[in-house]
């Protein structure tokens, strides 16, 4: 079997352009789907995939590790940046899909078989802007409570929210009280049996991240995510030691070496590698093995398209420390039109995989994808009150 083509199919899904990677073989009807979605860098990723393609054409697609090593180590630059992270990931995911299909088994069976019966899902409530909240009534925290109750009514037993607003490197009590009020309202609304996660999007400075983590500790968060930049690992570790709340991070980290440092510092309780950026299914499995030695949980970052979700689920069915899958279901109403998925969402906010659909169990409808061509994503800009640049 040989690879004869590597195609990129872009599908504009409102907030982001999904990049589906199709690796085509010389066997009739046998191809693999990967995903390499990277917001605001779509054209760069497609170019990177084109640059890697000469390493793949004519090669045996089932030699996945050999091809991963070639993509990463050859061409001298160790597949840095967009190449190392996203382009290799998208191709690698597609190669695993081909291997599963060629053998007629789901990918998780290639990795030792299923270790669980279902995968728990969580939804995302949004948030992140104090202005949204204070536009109505400064004493009114009902908006977050309403969103929380609505998602629980949909069947979810866990949800994430950006209740921590963007702040300057140092601010006074106002944002701290805002975050505390939002989380208190949600906890009061849903009770103690529902898991609440708060994502800071790595916007706070280390000191503000510490203050937020301390203020929210009494509310028993399932995890507190990216309290400060991933470039400040020692500070994330200090926050993890300062509070009982499990700290989660890692969605912007690429390669096993970044996660080795994170784990060696005991900086978090949950790692969140993004399978479409960290180096694909090959690399996330290596990262998971490393995390196993530290007894750290896995909750891959997954806000992208359906192939990313399929990859996360296949990985989750095989990885003992995988605890929960990020679920996106309201990005575009036609999400189910562009793909056929072999998994089923159950009413209890969890997902099962009936049957033995081979590979990743997802097929992309190219004709539907073509209806939503590339569009430049809207700029996501953030500025502090004084006009200085902030993090989105
Ligand atoms: Mg996050």
Image (cartoon, grey):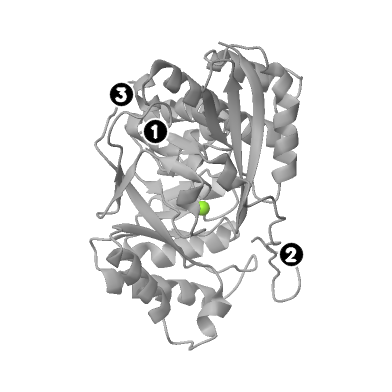
Secondary structure under the numbered disc 3 in the rendered image: loop
Number of residues whose C-alpha sits closer than 10 Å to that of mark 2, classed few (under 14), some (14–19) or many (20 or more)? few
Above or below, 103 relative to 163:
above
Q: Which residue is mark 3?
A: 113
Which residue is labeled 1 in the image?
314
Q: Quadrant of residue 386?
A: bottom right
Q: Are marks 3 and 1 in contact (CB under 8 Å)?
A: no
Badge 1 marks a residue whose secondary structure is helix
Above or below, comparing residue 181 to residue 377 in the picture: below
Q: Mark 2 or mark 1: which comes first in sequence?
A: 1
The quadrant of the rendering that contains the N terminus is top right
- Spatial distance from mark 2 to mark 1, Cα to Cα? 39 Å
Q: Vertical placement of 179 versus 250: above or below?
A: below
Q: Is residue 185 visible?
A: yes
* Residue at image coords 45%, 27%: 285
> Seen in the image, is 167 located left or right of residue 239?
right
Q: Which residue: 43% across, 63% down?
A: 214
Q: Residues within 10 Å of mark 3 (few under 14, many from 20)?
A: some
Which numbered disc flags the more N-terminal residue, 3 or 1?
A: 3
Residue at screen point 36% across, 76% down: 146
Residue 249 at x, y = what percent?
49, 46
Q: Where does label 2 land, which residue? A: 389
Distance between the Cα atoms at labels 2 and 3? 48 Å
Which quadrant of the figure has residue 101?
top left
Tell me residue 305's x, y (percent): 52, 46
Q: CA distance from mark 3 to mark 1?
A: 10 Å
Write the residue at 33% across / 57% down. 158
Q: Earlier in the sequence, mark 2 or mark 3?
A: 3
């Amino acid at each position: 079997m040989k690879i004869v083509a590597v195609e990129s199919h872009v599908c504009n899904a409102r907030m982001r352009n999904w990049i589906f990677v199709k690796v085509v073989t010389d066997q009739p009807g046998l191809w693999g789907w990967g995903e390499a979605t990277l917001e605001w860098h779509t054209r760069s990723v497609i170019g990177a995939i084109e640059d890697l393609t000469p390493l793949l054409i004519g090669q045996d697609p089932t030699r996945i590790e050999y091809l991963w090593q070639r993509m990463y180590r050859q061409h001298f630059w160790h597949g840095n940046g967009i190449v190392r992270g996203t382009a290799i990931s998208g191709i690698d995911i597609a190669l695993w899909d081909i291997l599963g299909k060629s053998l007629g088994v789901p990918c998780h069976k290639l990795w030792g078989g299923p270790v669980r019966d279902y995968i728990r899902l969580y939804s995302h409530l949004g948030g992140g802007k104090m202005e949204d909240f204070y536009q109505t009534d400064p004493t009114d925290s009902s908006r977050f409570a309403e969103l929380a109750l609505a998602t629980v009514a949909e069947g979810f037993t866990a949800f994430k929210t950006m209740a921590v607003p963007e702040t300057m490197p140092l601010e006074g009590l106002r944002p701290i009280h805002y975050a505390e009020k939002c989380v208190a309202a949600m906890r009061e609304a849903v009770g103690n049996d529902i898991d609440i996660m708060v994502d800071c999007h790595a916007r706070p400075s280390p000191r503000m991240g510490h203050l937020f983590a301390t203020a929210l500790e009494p509310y028993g968060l399932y995890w507190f995510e990216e309290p400060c930049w991933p470039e400040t690992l020692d500070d994330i570790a200090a926050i993890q030691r300062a509070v009982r709340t499990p700290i989660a991070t890692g969605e912007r980290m690429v390669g096993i070496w970044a996660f080795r440092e994170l784990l060696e510092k005991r900086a978090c309780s949950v790692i969140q590698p993004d399978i479409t950026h960290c180096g694909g299914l090959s690399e996330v499995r290596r990262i998971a093995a490393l995390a196993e030695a530290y007894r750290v949980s896995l909750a891959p970052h997954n806000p992208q398209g359906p192939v990313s979700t399929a990859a996360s689920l296949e990985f989750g069915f095989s990885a003992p420390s995988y605890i929960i899958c990020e679920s996106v279901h309201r990005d575009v109403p036609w999400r189910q039109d562009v793909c056929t998925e072999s998994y089923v969402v159950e009413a209890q906010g969890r997902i099962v995989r009936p049957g033995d659909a081979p590979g990743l169990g997802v097929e992309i409808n190219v004709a539907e994808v073509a209806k939503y061509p590339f569009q430049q994503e809207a700029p996501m800009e953030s500025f502090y009150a004084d006009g200085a640049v902030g993090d989105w």
